[in-house]
Amino acid sequence: MSHLTKFATAVSVAGLLVLTPIAGPGSNPTTAAGPVLSTLSTGGQGLRPQTVIPVAAAGVTYKTFDGVAFRPDANNDGSSNYVTGGAISPAASGWFGVRLDVPQGSRITELAWYVTDNSTAANLSLYLYRFDQSGVGGIAMSTFVSSGSSSGIQTLVTMPNFVVDNTNGSYILYAASVADPSLTLFGVRVGYVAASPSFYPIAPARVYDSRWATAGGAVGLISPTQSRLISVADGRSGAGVTHANLVPLGAKAISFNITVTGTLGRGWLALTPGNLSVYSSSTINYFGAGQTLANGGVVTIDPSTRQVRVFCDGNAGTAFIIDITGYYL
C-alpha cells in the first residue's frame, strides 16, 4: 500500500518533525543552498517551505540518507549530478542510488522521500530494489512513487512492509529521471522493525578440533589455567574450510556440542563468548584419563567476530571438539 502527500506551504503540527530549508531553492542548482535531512526542527509558523516528516513510531528504527549519498549507476564519483548543499539534482538521464543495509530479518515499514519538483516536463521516480548476489535480477520491493510539479517540498511515502533477506541479495534505494536541474532529491528516511532473535537449525557441522594440524584457533591439548579463542564462523575439516560462513555475520548466538576426548585426568572446560576473560561455570566435566564425553549448550557471540573462548581448569588437560547445530539471528 502506498500514499502520496504533498506540503506546498508552511505547516505547524504538534508532535511532528519538519524539514526546514537553509535557504529557499534557487535558480542555479550548483550554488543554491537547500534543505537536508540533517536539518530537522520543530514546525514554526514563519518557516517556508517545510516538509512534515512522519512522526517516529514506537519500536521502529530509522536510517536517513541526504541526497548527496546517492550516486549514478555509471559514474561513481557523482559528477553527473548537480550538488545543492546536501541535496542532488540529475544532470544526466538515468538512475542514481545508494545501498541500504539493515539487519537481517528486519521488516521495512516506511520509505519517506523528500523532493522538490519545479519541472512541468519531468518527474522523479523513486524505488527500493533488491538484487541477487550476482548484482542482477533487480526486483522492485516497494510501490514506486513519482513526484509532481509543485513549488514546495514534497513528502512521498510508501509503506512496503517486507522482510529483509541479506543472505541472498542486497538492497538499493533508487531515484530515476531525465536530466533536469529543477528536480531535487533532498534525501530519504527508512523505517524498519528489527527482527526478534530467530533460531536457524542446521545439520551438525564441525568448526573446531584441537587434534587437527590447523583449525580456527590454536591446536593441541588444552591444559589447566589456559584459555583458547576459537572462530565458529566456518565449517572445517582437518584439511581446511569446508563451509564458509556456516554461522553468518550478524548471528547473535549459537547452539553447540562440545566433546572432550583423550582426557589426561580430572578437569573441566568452560565455553563462553569470545570477549570474556573469565568464566563463571563449567560447560563439560571429565573425571579421569582416557574419557570421551559430550555436552550441548547455547552461547552468545559477537556478531562481527563470531568467536568463542574455551577455558580449561582442574588437574589435567584434554583434546576437545566443537560442533555447531544452529544459530540465532
Image (tube, grey):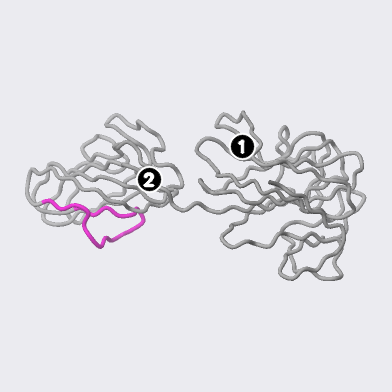
Please state which of residues 211 and 185 is positioned toward the viewer in this rendering: 185
Residue 283 figure quarter? bottom left
Element type where label 1 sits in the image: strand
Q: In the picture provided, is 64 more to the left or to the right than 210?
A: right
Examine the rendered structure and indicate whether residue 63 appears above or below residue 43.
above
The residue where tag 1 is placed is: 130
Q: In the picture provided, is 134 more to the left or to the right than 209?
A: right
Q: Does 20 lie within the magenta span?
A: no
Name the residue: 70% across, 37% down. 76
Residue 278 figure quarter? bottom left
* Residue 282: numbered disc: none
Within 10 Å of disc 2 (Cα), the crowding (few <14, some 14-19, many 20+) is many
Q: In the picture provided, is 127 more to the left or to the right than 327?
A: right
Taking the view exactly as shown, the residue that stands out farthest to the front is: 1
Name the residue: 81% across, 53% down. 154
Please state which of residues 168 and 108 is positioned toward the viewer in this rendering: 108
* Residue 327: numbered disc: 2
Residue 177 figure quarter? top right
Examine the rendered structure and indicate whether residue 176 appears above or below residue 268.
above
Q: Does 283 lie within the magenta span?
A: yes
State which region is magenta.
269-286
Percent position (x, y) of residue 20? 80, 62
The amino acid pointed to by label 2 is Tyr
Within 10 Å of disc 1 (Cα), the crowding (few <14, some 14-19, many 20+) is many
